Image (tube, coloured by chain):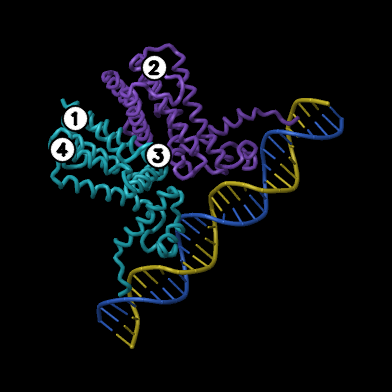
Chain colours: A cyan, B purple, C blue, D yellow
Amino acid sequence: MPKIVDHERRREELTRIVWGIISRDGIEGATVRKVAEAAGVSVGGLRHYFDNQRGLLSFAAQAVARSVAKRITGHLDANLPGMQRAQLILEELLPLDDNRRVEVDVWLACLVRSHVDESLAELRDASWSGERHICRLAVASCHGLPLPDRVGQEFADTGLEGQATRLHLFVDGLTLQTTTFPQHFTPQAMRRIVHDELRLIEAQFK
Amino acid sequence: MPKIVDHERRREELTRIVWGIISRDGIEGATVRKVAEAAGVSVGGLRHYFDNQRGLLSFAAQAVARSVAKRITGHLDANLPGMQRAQLILEELLPLDDNRRVEVDVWLACLVRSHVDESLAELRDASWSGERHICRLAVASCHGLPLPDRVGQEFADTGLEGQATRLHLFVDGLTLQTTTFPQHFTPQAMRRIVHDELRLIEAQFK
DNA sequence: TAGGAAACCGTACAGATGTGCTGTAATGGG
DNA sequence: CCCATTACAGCACATCTGTACGGTTTCCTA
């Protein structure tokens, strides 16, 4: 048997490196050579973990989705007051610290690239459904309603569903602006904006 | 004297071609060779109008801002009811037809590239101020208030300024989602979403 | 009509990029 | 101890990229 390497674990490590490069140099800077150099391996060495560059980017994007989903399920398992849970859930989508900022950078870069790279299309659609689900969770939490338990499950009430749709649009705009203009938004300001929006949703309970 | 060519006009023509390529192939597809081929000129020919590729992209992005601004001042000059004017102003930022869709594609591509390309930073900030101004115009129109006449001029009333900030975030999210997931949004749906949002702003008049 | 300036062409060059292929070191079970 | 299997290195190759530069055509003006 050969040298023992945890394949999946190594892929995750390499993915972190890819994230850093995309965040700093954009997705066009994430060349196989730069990734290999940053990881301290050769270009050939990368091929043992990723078939090609598109596979590398695709995996990096999937890893963002997994990372966000993991944190959010953590908040769902915790027993929190509805408004606080909604707040924490939405905050996981925003660049509130360095970790989340990097993830948002990767998310946005891959989202835009998916406009012209079909290998990211499936992931893009999954990301949209996942975000919409998160927004429904937040809306339900706001109102103290039972949480939808599967992705894609709409509210029976069209008013609630409309609130989720609106929140989804708002959060995407907030994410885009806060990554693009970080100097305009302190973490406190981001949290305040989310909080105000949740209060608005709560007040519009029908 | 040489062959007569309207320099500025030719730059605008070439810019349209750049827009089309960015919209179809992404900003990474907008190479000098592709642009030259699409324009029916040689790579050397391009250099008479653009010093380098960054100048080309920068001009293309500026042209989007000019195009949007031109249409919006058109709506301001027309004498329209407040709500209708607000609606039309905001609609100019959305991919409601092929022309606007291309412009939005270019806007988003350049916005994301500005994260790593400092030659687009100034334009990015100007775009942000311009959008914020447009949102203030829309909010003022909603309430039948006098329009702010210069970019950067905040409302004295913090409630109104907050509405403009919120609208700005919302519109950015709507723009991002509608370009990324065009199949989810018919033009009517986009207009409806804007309309509902304006009604909400109108109702929150303080 | 001659000339000069602008518009444009085509090529060259250096560098970067994705990917394929071959070689090599290491490791742990038989 | 042996050696198959895995991890990785490193180079080759074709392609694409931005840019520089010299040459050529075109057409208005003096």
Labels 3 & 1 near each other (Cβ < 8 A): no
Residue type highlighted by circle 4 = Gly
Q: Position of residue B2 (x, y in %)?
A: 74, 31
How far from the left and from the top, in percent, is residue B154? 39, 24
Determine crowd level at label 2: few under 14, some 14-19, many 20+ residues with C-alpha closer than 10 A: many
Discs 4 and 3 share one subunit: yes
Q: Earlier in the sequence, mark 4 or mark 3?
A: 4
Using the image as rendered, state which of residue B197 and residue B129 is in the foreground: B129
Pointer 4 residue: A82
**Tags 1 and 4 both on a single chain:** yes
Q: Is residue B192 left or right of residue D27?
A: left
Q: Position of residue A103 (x, y in %)?
A: 34, 48
- Alpha carbon separation for disc pair 2 and 4: 39 Å
**Which chain does the residue under circle 4 lie in?**
A
Question: Disc 1 residue type?
Answer: Glu
- Identified at 42% across, 28% down, the residue is B131
Mark toward the viewer: 3 or 1: 3
Q: Mark on residue B32?
A: none
Name which of mark 3 and mark 1 comes first in the sequence: 3
